[in-house]
Amino acid sequence: MAEQEGSSLFGLCTFTFVPSKDLTDSVIDELSQSIKKYGGQVRDRKRDGSLPLATITHIVSNTIEFPQYDESTAMMIPVVRSKWISASLAKGKQAQIRPYTPDPRMIFSDVMLSCADIPDTDKDAIIGATMAMGGMYSDNVTKLTTHICALSVDHPKVQMTMERKHKCKIVLPHWFDDCFRLGKRIDEAPYLLPDPEILRVSPERSIEPQCSPYIDGAISARPDYLQPPESLGRKLHLTVFNEKKVMLSKDLEMRDRLRRIVVDLVTSGGGQMTDSADECDWLVCRYRDTEEYVRASQLGKTVGNMSWLFYLIQHNAWSNPLHRLLHYPEPRNGIPGFKGMKISVSNYGGEARIYLENLIKCSGATFTKTMKADNTHLVTARDNSEKCEAARDWNIDMVNHLWIEESYAKCEMQTLTVSKYTHFPPRTNLGEIIGQTFFDEKRLEAVYFPSGPEKSMAVPVRKRKALDMTDENSAVEKPGSSAIAGRQMRKEFNIMRDTDGENVEMADLPPPSERRPSEFATPARGRHVRSGKENETPSTVTSSSRSAKDKALGRLSVLAPDIALYEKEKKRGLKDGHGPWGGKRAADLIEREHLNRRQTSSPMAGEDKESKLEKRPAKKAKPTLPEVDVRIILTGFKRWVNDKAKEDADRKKLRDLGIAVVQDGQPCDYLIAPQLVRTVKFLRNLSKGAIVLSSNWVEQCIDTKQVPDPEEYILRDKENEKRFGLKLETSIRRAQKNQGRLLRGIPIYCTVGIKNGIESYQAIAEANDAIFMVYGPKSGTTIKPTNPEDDEGGPEPVYLLTTSTPEEKKLWKRFEDMARKGNMEPRVVASDWLLDVVMKQEVSFDKKYLVTNFFT
């Protein structure tokens, strides 16, 4: 029996691997055998090295440095380290995704925290922030616990850990506080109990500068030399350039010999050289103001500098140039505001010091080795040194490297009042976390290659899905933004976005219509569900408003009756041609008099005008488009990804055939999708009973300029039908019968902090006529208390969609008590219940959706 259960551990999972230095082919082979043994599938990469994202559920990678990472994150495909497979096999069930993400921005991704003698308020803050940054929390200390937060070693948890010699680290809460302030994870050593260094050693004592791996090969934007292959003592077999077209910009000013070496390495590695920014896959340039840079960036090409290209050659592995500041082209005139500044560096050593020197120069400021009174800033890893003392005496601004890094990454000078720029942990040299800042891609686009409507139609709009779906440091600021739970029975999806290439953003989802409070009442049980908000603040003029504003409002209120009478008088007409003078009667007479006066004053002018109009040749009639016979909505359509010009041309071809591509929320005849997906767009239109066609139908229409029979292209997806446990044909037939009233009268609450946001679930629920309400910590009683004796029939169910975060767990019992007092059956469920019900178009309930079962 145990063997049978284990054999289906990965039964619904399809994996692919991303090789790297610590994930070799031999390790991949071993892990692949384990996956197949326990029911999973393994897909190989494509010939060009890309990943088959459309057919996989998990990506195993120990790094985020692969080209399709942003796209996989946008498609909500979990990216896990190889340890996740071992942990799942050890547990006998799929482990949580959060502790095994390779994203370095999730600084606590491998932290399993337990708290000891910490005050409740501090404890809640530490737990919440740790989980938001990728960590996990457990009340009990287990073998999986990596950190215990404690103030002393006297707590029973700490005593038990020390007695059993667990390998977890016992740290002071000061470590979490310093990590939270910096937004980076620093070394725990100075904070470890029972003898923490920060309480024992003076802050003034010197610390050896630490080396950061994040600046390896990225300390300069302009490397001077590349070793030729002959001098390396071995022949290079590069694979990183395979089937890639590389363009070297003219602004590189490369010597002929170096250019020949680079070209030979690219071509011998399976790549091609090109001089066209439209055709290239990678552009190598120096500055951000060249035509090649702007064009390639707008087209979504990978753009880097010579330092980035040398890094690829030396490591034979792809690296995202946006993840290392000096791997990206530099601004020709620096960052606004830095010109004229004199900046010195202290407490950074080795490559970190060279890196900061080059970064300061690229920003447009002047770097000085020695500091004088005319210096404007001091960048230091600690707040103790001779330069630091002099900076205090001379009133020179003293900051850490995060200020210069984030100013360069966000393309504008950051204010010095941000606390993390002036925070210096007492026994930590911040050189250990240097180089971890990523570029803000939205700021780059806005400043250096804006793609607004004024651009020519020949220049496609740059479309990076990751920019539309994630922001810089979102993994730090938003809980669980990139950590996706991976369980055997839980289907992963991104309900906030489709995976197609349509040129739409979150505006695809029409804004929820404003509803009157009375619309939130349950039709069948109006006495249960109350309406409106708990605390509504009346709209009044605050006492702090200016006196002029008060006087104007008072004067307006006095004139309001007169204004109303005036408007009424203007609209007053005649009854049977009689009535008092004024109103419409007077206005019509004045208008007729003006018209007669113009006609009598220039009779010939009118005749001349008419003769000219008669002599003017008739304009050629514009060709009219055929009537719209078919309206379609696309989801998951990948033909137009990163190609706006092609999208516009194809849309015109479809329109010439009488086919209109409409936005979500509008009536449609067919829903086009490559496969079954659980996105907002798919579920909303499925609820309307739309026929689902394969995307091949649209491809045929465009390519042949003819409209094939839609019946021959009905979507058939046996694999995903088995995965979701449904028949698409049956779901469509049920939806047409339900007519969008599947969940009519069923109250569905949703917690404020639910993953993916309440808007997506609200759109899906209301598309099926459910009563949707938001439930939060400040929500009052919205179900009327009812005695069972006064209620006809048994208790009816009421649902709460939630996740398993500590903040939401606190709401469960209060919600259940509110429901029971209203003689209703509370069901606190995972959001998958709503998605499965809508997908099947059948109201059903299984206890597996209860949070007590689903998240365990």
Image (spheres, rainbow, N blue to C red):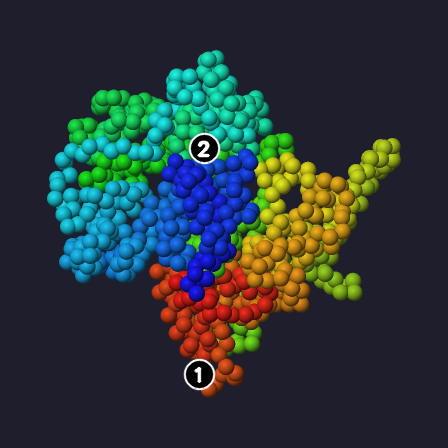
Task: Quote the CA–CA distance across marks 1 and 2.
Answer: 66 Å
Mark 2 = which residue?
318
Which one is earlier in the sequence, the residue at label 1 or at label 2? 2
- Please provide percent x and percent y for residue 477: 38, 48
Which of the pair 785/485 is nearer the observer? Answer: 485
Query: Which quadrant of the figure contains the C terminus?
Result: bottom left
Is any atom of residue 565 visible in this view?
A: no
Q: Going 19% across and 47% down the picture, which residue do you hit?
A: 192
Image disc number at residue 226: none
Residue 112 can be seen in this image: yes
**Looking at the image, residue 395 lies above or below residue 549:** above
Confirm or deny contact between disc 1 and disc 2 (CB under 8 A).
Answer: no
User: Which sits in the foreground, 76 or 434?
Assistant: 76
Residue that label 1 marks: 787
**Residue visible at 38% across and 50% down?**
86
| Farthest-out residue, top | 256
- What x and y, as percent, mark residue 658? 75, 47
Residue 583 lies left or right of residue 225; in this view the side is right
Residue that appears at 31% across and 56% down? 137
Q: Which amino acid type corresponds to the residue marked 1 in the rendered image?
A: Asn
Residue 381 pos. (x, y %): 24, 34
Locate residue 661, reporting x and y percent. Answer: 67, 48
At label 2, the amino acid type is Trp
Q: Residues within 10 Å of mark 1 (few under 14, many from 20)?
A: few
> Which residue: 59% across, 40% down?
641
Which part of the image, by quadrant, shows the N terminus?
bottom left
Identify whether 328 is placed above or below 675.
above
Q: Of discs 1 and 2, which sits in the foreground? A: 2
**Which secondary structure lies at badge 1?**
loop
Circle 2: element type = loop
